[in-house]
Amino acid sequence: MSIDTTIVSVTTIEQIGQYAGQKVRLRGWLDTMRSSGKIRFLKLRDGTGRIQGVLTKNDAGEELFERTGHLGQESSLIVEGEVREDARAPGGYELLVSGVEIVHNAEGYPITPKDHGTDFLMDHRHLWIRSQRQHAILRVRAQVMRSISDWLDNHGFLRIDTPILTPSACEGTTTLFETKYFESSAFLSQSGQLYNEATAMAFGKVYAFGPTFRAEKSKTRRHLMEFWMVEPEMAFVDMWENMEIQEQMVSYVVQQCLQHRRRELELLERDLSKLEKIVPPFPRIHYDEAVQILRDKGVEFEWGGDFGGTDETVVSEQFDRPVFVHHFPAAVKAFYMKPDPDRPETVLGADLLAPEGYGEVIGGGQRLDDLALLEQRIAEHQLPTEAYAWYVDLRRYGSVPHSGFGLGVERTVTWVCGIEHVRETIAFPRTLYRLYP
Ligand code: 4AD
Ligand code: MG
């Protein structure tokens, strides 16, 4: 009986460069296999990367060669072999396969290298996320979220998460998801902002980071029913300082993606020169100016209206960086926005529109800090007073000028990746007609 005394390191494709010339073991899945005579090329993936395994009848032996002949796409394997440096290989390395343990032989994997329609891929989202393109996008997403947290944590913001089950609306009563709450009902949070205003009065600078929900009957490439938002809120900050903070944070996030996710962005064929331009300051234009731009470009637009997707695209295309549009008409904005004392029909808020037609990625502004005016607004919007009593209280006990904003993660990732639709930027998108898988 022979005892195998060689210790073979288990590693990942990402780390494999450390083992050049040595034997390693990889655990993963078979992407594609191509055979040509006495040689097989196994494209393996393990979640950290992809590598080509080369299996020859001569080196691996007849038995192993035969056993691997019928492996289906996405079969799970433990593969052993020697790591060989190869400048022509995509990751710089190849594996000379000497052993294969078949953990599970998969048959009839539905997503093949041929073209599939979007609906088919969406129905198979649980499998589609294994593809290279989806990997790249979801890695950029993770980087965006991480960079946001890093920036805020390093700039004196305290993360405080706000509730998802709420008794009241933040962003209008027409887009609420209602759910049973024992004998009464609750709404899924549209935004953590109102609670953040309370925590900002307790801690100064705070942020919430979590999922938010909107029952929006919008079937556009920018809308999800469930999306993630980061929402910083700051006491003693006005709308102008609020914008400075946003441009700093957004620039940092984009530059971090360029630094740490360049490979993924290249795979997505992103024009990196466009992202390199994302540095402060971002242009700031008044709503009046935005309306003028629209009219100059031949869009029929009446002062007082909200921007639709096309309007945002037309305005943002005039700039090579994100652009702030401030002083929207009060009538199209939420009840909590502070009116401009000099032109009370407009508010001290700003939306940030991403370039290249990606539309609004941030909504934010200065909050109403006056008790009487806030009570008036709540009445005008016909909101139930009892549900907002605690919120109104914040204007009774040490009310201060304060501001905040909400950045939508999926829209930001869509823009950074330069892709067409938000649905690819979250693992399991919830859209108007899709709650599966
Ligand atoms: O402009 P919104 O509605 O602002 C708020 O909710 C504020 N309470 C935030 C705050 O000041 N704390 O939403 C903010 C951002 C939008 O700019 C957009 O990026 C994203 O959230 N967003 C959506 N993303 C995907 N699908 C949807 N249906 C979205 N609705 C808003
Ligand atoms: Mg908005």
Image (spheres, rainbow, N blue to C red):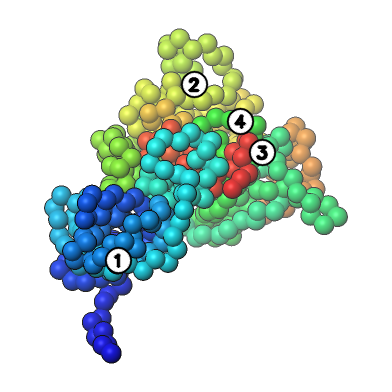
Given residues 54 and 197, the one toward you in this image is: 54
Q: Which residue is mark 1?
A: 64
In the image, 226 versus 83, the foreground residue is 83
Residue 319 position, x and y percent, is 35, 26
* Kind of residue sitting beneath label 4: Ser
Local packing at callout 4 (Cα closer than 10 Å; few below 14, some 14-19, many 20+) is few
**Residue type, mark 1 in image:** Leu
Mark 1 closeness class: few <14, some 14–19, many ≥20 residues within 10 Å: some
Find residue 96 and report its horizontal and vertical position in percent. Answer: 21, 63
Residue marked by disc 2: 311
The quarter of the rendered structure image containing the N terminus is bottom left
Cα distance between the residues tagged 1 and 3: 55 Å
Residue for badge 4: 218
Q: Position of residue 250 (x, y in %)?
A: 39, 44
Q: Amino acid at mark 3?
A: Ala
Residue position for label 3: 215
Q: Position of residue 248 (x, y in %)?
A: 37, 45
Q: Secondary structure at mark 2?
A: helix
